Amino acid sequence: MAAALTSALLAGCASTPLPPWPDRNASRPPPPVRQIPPPSRQEQAPAPMARPGVVLPAPVPRTADGATTAPVVRPSLAPLTGTLPDLPYRPEVAARFPDPPILYHTPGLHPDRRAFTTNAEIGQWLHALAQQTTPPTTRATVLQLGPSQRGAPIHALVLTQERDEQPQALAESKRPTVLLIGQQHGDAPASSEALLVVAQELAQGLLAPLLERINVIIVPRANPDGAEAGTAATADGTDLQRDHLLLHSPEARVLNQLVRDYRPMVVLDSGEFPAAGAVLTQFGGLNRHDAHLSYATTGNVHEFVTKAAREWMQQPLEQALQGLGLAVEWAHSPSAVPGERRMVMDSVQPDSGRNLWGLKHAVSLRVASRGVGLGRTHIQRRVHTQVNAMAAALRMASERAARLEQVRSFVIRDTVALACRNKVVVQAAHTTESRELTLLNPDTGADMPTTVEWDSALRLSPTLERARPCGYWVAPTAQPAIERLRLHGLQVLRVAEAGAVLAEAPQSPGTTAASPLARTAIDVPAGSYYVPLNQPMANVAIAALEADTPFGFASQRLVGLPEEVLRVMVTPSLVFEDME
């Protein structure tokens, strides 16, 4: 079977040697995913010292065989009245989501708390972990990625067994770097609480041995302003999850600078999805799944990146969560068109972090727990879902460390070699099918099988393709575009002497239908720019600079005029100078 898959993929990537893809049936099965309780003080060496203002996990009583005997805190269920903030369902539905057999501890999960962990407490928690780790076994370092729009710090924790936490040191370690990001939407608190648990387990708990084979960076809360306000968006109303190509918000800029500098091979985005909302109003039912999963599904993601995401991450995570009695489904939401009985899988546009990181050759996965609109209800179960999903992903990354490096190396070489050849997908759409989706009856809690139209992101339907150019010429007036391209890690060359290029330019950019292209020789001045496609981040340049898309730089006014970006169809003979 592996040989047949390899032969099929060779047709599209014959330019460089193909790494052997392992036969999944012959490979060693992944180890079972253990439920991760907070570590007891007997397991920690040395025992952590509490810092002022930091709530460290309390000891967990255990039986002689090591099983936890911690009591389970069961959140109270508001009475059903049909109005917010009461829950949109009855206790019969809540009974379908019992608490896990263990109790997780963070500042915001204390049973007497009404508010979740504050941003200041996140910083204190991470700094306490950094002080408690003892090099050379494990080094934990807190990074300040930059302020949010309202000035709140965005914290990150780097965990490694390398000599220091600098990007070059991690790159030379030959260990894959895994990046975990939480709470891009401010109304997804379980994601940040879970990542605090995961951070502690990596620093001094059950996950610490994984650092022998991987490096890990954790950003527990990417959107502190939204978290403080309890809203999905950032302070200025930006949807952070959809701002990763344009980089309008400072939050998106610091996240992508982190990706540019540390070049993670695996990126996991942790969030939450609504328990009711439009699913209830349009379908008369409730979401029954604990977790929604999705990997990068956009045009031009390399097929090996997709294959690694599906076989090495999505499938093992699904099996691990199902083994714990948690229900899993592909990420989806009701159509935005009123009256349609249609479910749509996650976006196929390259502006989301999940999709853009796939274009940057990272195995990218989004893990969302059922929680938006629930407040603190079921919070232990939601955190339980996230913690075990992240633990499974970290274990798979550790087990596949050498293979991840091999696939990344091949994909980069193949992407570089494709410049001036083959086609690129400019726009793509979901494919529509009919399928049965099980919802919950909001009155009885019983399963409610429902036939829906389903827009799948797993098989893309290209709606606009063009010949792959050799690169893009960009006018010197398009500085906002140049700044963003460089922030994404793209090589941008400045033209030192005036010359000419053979190029294509659209006659009416920024539309959603194909515009006619005219190919001609164009004189280009000194001080303008050239973005070659024989570089690793080529597919990010394609997403940003192709016209005729609703998400690119032209339609979003980062490029003003049609003649400010040209598709260069023959390798140009120009003189370039270094950019600072």
Image (tube, rainbow, N blue to C red):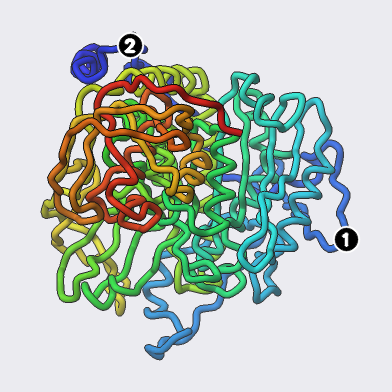
**The residue under label 2 is which amino acid type?**
Thr
**Can you tell which of label 2 and label 1 is closer to the viewer?**
2
Label 2: which secondary element: loop
Q: Farthest top residue?
A: 17
Q: Quadrant of residue 446?
A: bottom left
Query: Horizontally, is 543 left or right of 527 in the view?
Result: left
Q: Marks 1 and 2: in contact by CB < 8 Å? A: no
**The residue under label 1 is which amino acid type?**
Pro
Label number found at residue 63: none
Label number found at residue 16: 2
For the residues labelled 2 and 1, the Cα–Cα distance comes to: 56 Å
Picture layout, residue 349 above or below residue 88: above
Q: Residue at x 32, y 43 (%)?
A: 565
The image position of residue 558, as x and y in percent, is 40, 54
Label number found at residue 52: 1
Q: Residue at x 52, y 53 (%)?
A: 252
The image position of residue 380, as x and y in percent, is 56, 61
Which residue is nearer to you in this view: 544 or 83?
A: 544
Query: Horizontally, is 232 left or right of 414 in the view?
Result: right
Picture layout, residue 292 above or below residue 342: above
The image position of residue 361, as x and y in percent, is 42, 31
